[in-house]
Amino acid sequence: MMILTIAGRELRSMFLSPLAWAVLAVVEAILAFLFLQQLDLFIAFQSQLAMLESPPGVTEVVAMPIFSTAAIVLLLVVPLLTMRLLSEEKRQKTLPLLMSAPISMSEIVLGKYLGMVAFLAIMVALIGLMPLSLLAGGRLDFGLLLTALLGLLLMVSAFAAAGLFLSSLTNHPAVAAVSSFGLLLLLWLIDIAGGADGATSDQLLSWLSLQRHYDALLKGLIDSGDLIYFLLFSATFLLLTVRQLDAERLQSG
């Protein structure tokens, strides 16, 4: 119950924040512009695509590139949203008061995390409305579309978990934002370091890559390994955040 109370408080505070509204507006504006550009491209080459043996539909040509770009845009902006989750509480000296309340560290962390994920889910839903507008003039592959939405939601949930952990390490929101962005970018590109010789270390780097697991979902492939990766990713950073706050409470006690 306390988890939902904290999550609701975090979600309300997000909608009271000018930064959150600015991020929401900028993300939607950028993706809407790219969506219209991609739609123009599809219309221009529609006749040529129809001549192919298995022509790609409007979902593959217009919607999937938008979801691919959305992940990169959100990788840039989610750290701006998560940077204040705990660092701001530290900076304003309100975190000790929250820790002294009769609630566990797990409830505090999960409440803040779920509040952020709820805000990001609203953002993902708004992004999903763009492809739905194509129903006015064509047919959509709803299976592929739902898989892409699931992948994007899992991706931003992972971003939020990592951002929450980095926010717990400092009382400077800007430091939390920059370090979160650096970590997420590294985990996005880490498979580039893998070679083509199939060594175990290369396979491990490839498995750690956020992009690799997200791309699989964008192709409509729902693999349990990809789902487990995102769940483990988020759970690991949430656990690290709980341990960090527990350590701080013990030190202050």
Image (spheres, helix red, strand yellow):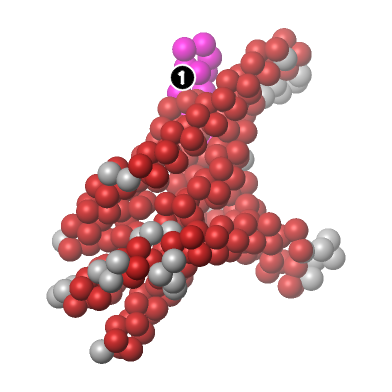
Q: Which residue ends up furthest to the right in the rendered image?
A: 197
Identify the residue shown where x is 27% and y is 54%: 10
Overall secondary structure of the magenta stretch? helix
User: Which percent across, then down, holds residue 117?
Assistant: 37, 51
- Residue 142 vertical placement versus 102 (above, below): above
Pick the residue in front: 227 or 117. Answer: 117
Q: Is residue 105 left or right of residue 51?
A: left
What type is the residue that disc 1 sits on? Ser
> How busy is the neighbourhood of tag 1: few (under 14 within 10 Å), some, or many (20 plus)?
few
Residue 7 is a magenta residue: no
Tell me, yes or no, whether the highlighted magenta stretch contains residue 138: yes
Task: Provide the residue designation for mark 1.
Answer: 133
The structure residue drawn at horizontal position 62% and vertical position 57%, both measured from the top left corner, is 185
Which quarter of the figure is the N terminus placed in? bottom left
For the magenta stretch, what is the residue range? Answer: 132-144
Q: Residue drawn at (64%, 61%), measured in percent from left and top?
A: 186
Task: Answer above or below: position of 17 versus 198.
Answer: above
- Label 1's element? helix
What is the x, y in percent for residue 78?
A: 47, 51
- Looking at the image, can residue 88 be seen? yes
Q: Position of 197 compared to 217: left or right? A: right
